[in-house]
Amino acid sequence: MRFDIDKLGLITYLCGMKKVVLIGSGNVATHLGKAFIDSGIKVLQVWSRSYENASFLAKELKCNASADIKNIIPDADAYIFSVKDDVLEEVVRMFPYKDKFLIHTAGSISIDLLKDYSSKYGVFYPLQTFSKQKEVDFTSVPILIEASSPTLLNKLSGLATSISEHVLPASSEQRKYLHISAVFSCNFTNYMYSLAESLLEENGLSFDLVRPLIKETAEKALLHSPKDVQTGPAVRKDMKIVNSHLDLLDSQPDVKALYAVLSERIIKDL
Amino acid sequence: MRFDIDKLGLITYLCGMKKVVLIGSGNVATHLGKAFIDSGIKVLQVWSRSYENASFLAKELKCNASADIKNIIPDADAYIFSVKDDVLEEVVRMFPYKDKFLIHTAGSISIDLLKDYSSKYGVFYPLQTFSKQKEVDFTSVPILIEASSPTLLNKLSGLATSISEHVLPASSEQRKYLHISAVFSCNFTNYMYSLAESLLEENGLSFDLVRPLIKETAEKALLHSPKDVQTGPAVRKDMKIVNSHLDLLDSQPDVKALYAVLSERIIKDL
């Protein structure tokens, strides 16, 4: 099933979703809520397992927080569940109404999780890393959508295109692969940065020294295929340098093992 | 031994090195050569094991190429060896003159490699990834320097500060740790990107979908400690998601093994 997103964008006004309730108050809910109100979508209410956190976010979004999930406002166009993956089903189960439009925002959870709780459901997955420390420009964030019917997919597309220029339908399986790709591109990449930071600190050197390199490496990947711009001793098959690095990492067997396996993979793959 | 770089910067005019010869014509030599001429440092000549490549670079730098290393111009202030690590010593051995100022640009090779070939030697290590596809703004590239005497370190500092605002003395051992940190920050990071690219392509999805994420992840590391901004299922200890990703990677045992070991390390370290 494929949809023409340009056409879907035009349908926004016809099937506009203008009022949502946010279930959750973490990083995704926070950034999403801000993007919604900036685009004229009303966030009617926030509920979260922590009333304190819900109130904090509600204040930022200029709405109210519900202390009890049973008292959630019943007339929103959609209820967006943006909670930790491992409590999502538990929270959906607590939701008090039947046949509301339920949406989750998780990369790796199938749309089917929602089907026992409503006949109208969907997924709205913003493919970005969100943290308290940094604002995000939502217009460039890809949003992957999936819904229980073409009509609801249209509605979801309208909602998504109101905050992002990159809206795309994706199946639950595609979304999972996207999430794994995001883990490599972001989470594991950040872990590489943190290993560099530790190595530098342990040797009296500042992490600032590699920051220009981090910037340049990312910028290159924005313009080129990473396979075409791989650099370093492993891809040059310069085993003298690879081995001298491994020797220097003798006192840190875990880091050494990672260096070895990643170099081996680069030599084999690229 | 520590030097005050601000003071060293002022000495540039007093002990200025204005004429260099480049030995090598690869990415580092090319970007370095361009930065030199942009800053008024004369590149007198280029020599490389491939005369064709040397001529190509010489043309770009508006100088001549030497076909035979024996005919290299003898009156440069410094001879900068920027060749592949594994042929560096072989090339230095071919150099025809005694007691010229010899400099190498390798991250992981000790300054001592040069001591049998001259009494004046040093290291000039620009900590950046260079590729043919992309220009580099050298002013922000950290340059790590080391020399056989304080006087030569001054000279080297003058040369480095003429093209970069971030010049720092570093011992051969520190430089090696810097190089390993660069491998993690750049080479292994780029490999993470390339794994994401493969996963996406195999599932009919565009690498463009994770490019905003790559940009955001790098930008975050420019402002914060990577340890403080780690996100993803592993750091949340969300084993349900980690395991579901591992299941999905069953058909790619190498990628699966990497996903497993990196998740394990993040869970343990952060």
Image: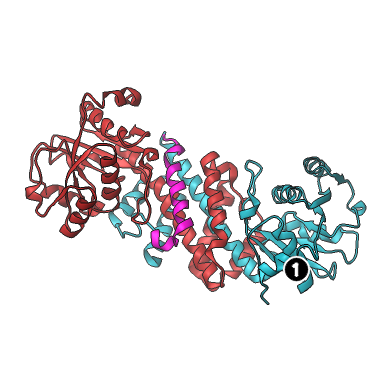
Chain colours: A red, B cyan
Label 1: how many residues lie within 10 Å, few (<14), some (14-19) or many (20+)?
many
View extreme (bottom): residue: B1
| Magenta stretch holds residue A161 | no
Q: Secondary structure at mark 1?
A: helix
Residue shown at the point (39%, 59%) measured from the top left: B229
Viewport quadrant of the C terminus of chain B: bottom left
Residues A56 and B262: in front is: A56
Q: For this rendering, which residue is in front, A32 or A236?
A: A32
Give the overall secondary structure of the magenta segment: helix
Task: Indicate yes or no whether the magenta region holds residue B219.
Answer: yes
The residue shown at (36%, 41%) is: A138
The quadrant of the image that shows the N terminus of chain B is bottom right
Residue B191 percent coordinates (x, y): 52, 50
Q: Read off the residue under disc 1.
A: B154
Relative side of B89 to A126, left or right: right
Chain of residue at mark 1: B
Horizontally, residue A130 falls left or right of residue B170, namely left
Q: Is residue A9 above or below residue A137?
A: above
Provide residue A179's location: percent of width, then percent of height: 36, 45
Residue B203 shows in the view: yes
Q: How many marks?
A: 1
* Residue drawn 72% across the image and 57% down it: B162
Q: Amino acid at mark 1?
A: Asn
**Range of magenta residues:** B205-229
Q: Residue at x 17, y 53 (%)?
A: A48
Q: Is residue A124 left or right of residue B227?
A: left
- Eyeballing the image, is B62 above or below B145? above
Q: Could one spot residue B258 in this view of the protein?
A: no
B190 left or right of A162? right
Q: Residue A188: horizontal and vertical position, in percent?
A: 44, 55
Q: Position of residue A127 (x, y in %)?
A: 36, 43
